[in-house]
């Protein structure tokens, strides 16, 4: 069997500009719905496969993202991943582990927020003393610290469990849900604790706003109000 990939482009592909091999999900039988989807291995050297230049994103710039164009790419039967019509199973098996990986991103953002705020509350003086000595500030810093470390410990525990073999999907979904929700709570802390100093772009507080918007879009399927 040889099938021809559609000319419809695939958008928002992580590592699209850099990958030598990609997994493409396409249908062999549109009438079959999800049961008609098959996973194909497509190599960069195949005629008609054209990765586009990377996009300039608001955040996660270390992960290149681009559009992939398939212009009548012919894929032989040997490049089918799994079985014909079994693409959804392949997709979901990878998605469960991807959730754990994505959960680590918000932890990095929370750590970056803490790294910005902690020195500031020791340097900034009000009423002759560092604002970090005020009970209100100490309470907020304690919340940031405990939230960060609780989220980190849970994600690490789930990741370690995944190394031991398949885990219940609910375990990975909770790990995927918890850090983003906590990160939404912490996202404005650098600006709030820095008062007016959080508004100039030179302070880099704005970087976390860009990361917030990008990760919220990346994690949009999560119902944060129900996590």
Image (spheres, helix red, strand yellow):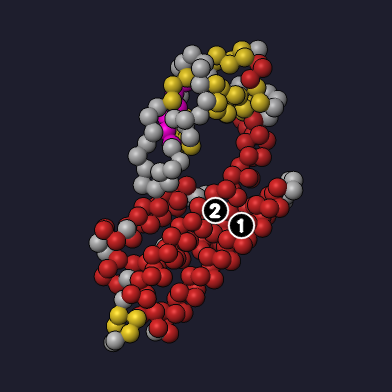
Which is more N-terminal, label 2 or label 1? 2
Q: Residue at x 66, y 40 (%)?
A: 93
State the quadrant of the C terminus.
Answer: bottom right
Residues packed near mark 1 inside 10 Å, few (<14), some (14 to 19) or many (20 plus): many
- What kind of element bears circle 2? helix
Q: Which residue is mark 2?
A: 104
- The x and y percentages for residue 48 are 46, 16
- The x and y percentages for residue 111 are 47, 61
Q: Which residues are magenta?
A: 65-70
Above or below, 62 relative to 187: above
- Closest to the observer: 12 or 19? 19
In this picture, residue 209 sits left or right of residue 141: left
- The x and y percentages for residue 197 are 27, 68
Q: Residue at x 43, y 46 (%)?
A: 60
Q: Residue at x 39, y 84 (%)?
A: 134
State the quadrant of the N terminus.
Answer: top right
Tag of residue 155: 1
Residues at badges 1 and 2 in contact (C-beta under 8 Å)? yes
In this picture, residue 112 sits left or right of residue 130: right
- What kind of element bears circle 1? helix
- Closest to the observer: 202 or 39? 202
Above or below, 79 relative to 89: above
Residues packed near mark 2 inside 10 Å, few (<14), some (14 to 19) or many (20 plus): some
């Amino acid at each position: 069997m040889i099938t021809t990939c559609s000319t419809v482009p695939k958008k928002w592909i992580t590592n699209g500009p850099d990958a030598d091999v990609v997994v493409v999900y396409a249908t062999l039988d549109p009438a079959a719905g999800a049961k008609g989807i098959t996973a194909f291995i497509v190599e960069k050297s195949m005629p008609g496969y054209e990765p586009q230049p990377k996009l300039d994103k608001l955040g996660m710039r270390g992960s290149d993202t681009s559009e992939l164009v398939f212009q009548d790419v012919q894929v032989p039967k040997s490049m089918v991943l799994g079985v014909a019509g079994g693409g959804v199973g392949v997709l979901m098996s990878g998605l469960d582990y991807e959730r754990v990986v994505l959960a680590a991103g918000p932890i990095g953002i929370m750590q970056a927020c803490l790294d910005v705020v902690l020195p500031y509350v020791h340097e900034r003086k009000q009423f002759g003393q560092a604002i970090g000595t005020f009970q209100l500030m100490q309470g907020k810093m304690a919340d940031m610290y405990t939230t960060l470390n609780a989220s980190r410990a849970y994600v690490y525990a789930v990741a370690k469990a995944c190394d031991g073999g398949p885990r219940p999907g609910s375990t990975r979904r909770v790990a995927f849900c918890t850090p983003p929700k906590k990160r939404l709570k912490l996202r404005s802390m650098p600006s709030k604790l820095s008062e007016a100093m959080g508004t100039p772009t030179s302070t880099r507080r704005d970087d976390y706003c860009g990361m917030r918007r990008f990760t919220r879009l990346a994690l949009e399927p999560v119902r944060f109000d129900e996590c």
